[in-house]
Amino acid sequence: MPLTTEKSIIIVIVAAVCTFATRLFPFALFGGKRQVPKFIQYLGKILPPAIIGILIVYCLRDFTNGNINTILPGIIASAATALVHIWKKNTLLSIAVGTIGYMMLIHFVFV
């Protein structure tokens, strides 16, 4: 069942309003002279490293498979990402190097 133009426009508008609302919510809640609660500050410090850890585990999840062609590209790409991030301190560059490196490895080296 294809979407009509009207339904597509409504979907885009709803998505835009929801996205804008989620970006506006923290400023409306904690803006001005209100102090950010200690729990929110704690989450702001602890969640980024925790999320990175989860992403590393997800990236290397095929380690138990035992096939070197599935394990080695992930390890090499993860190491390249870490090294570029330590060297340049640029998150987007690190992500790009890891992603492009991984794709190049699985498509051209570890076929």
Image (cartoon, grey):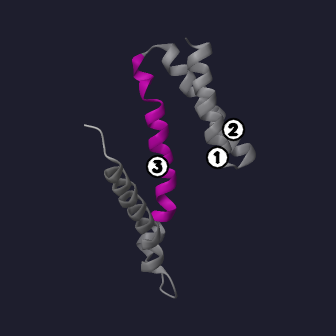
> Residue placed at 43% from the left, 24% from the top?
62
Q: Indicate the secondary structure of the residue bearing disc 1.
A: helix
Q: Which residues are magenta?
A: 43-65
Q: Which residue is mark 3?
A: 51
Mark 2 and mark 1 lie on one chain; the one further toward the N terminus is 2
Marks 2 and 1, how far apart at CA: 13 Å
Residue type marked 2: Leu
Q: In x, y percent, where is residue 6?
A: 33, 53
Q: Indicate the secondary structure of the residue bearing disc 2.
A: helix
Q: Does residue 35 appear left or right of residue 78 in this picture?
A: left
The C terminus lies in which quarter of the figure?
A: top right
State the image quarter where residue 105 is shown. Answer: top right
Q: Residues within 10 Å of mark 3 (few under 14, many from 20)?
A: few
Q: Which residue is mark 2?
A: 83
Q: In x, y percent, where is residue 17?
A: 40, 65
State the image quarter where residue 39 is shown. Answer: bottom left
Q: In x, y percent, where is residue 4?
A: 31, 46
- Is residue 36 shown to the viewer in this render? no
Q: Look at discs 1 and 3 and give the one toward the viewer.
A: 1
Q: Which residue is mark 1?
A: 92
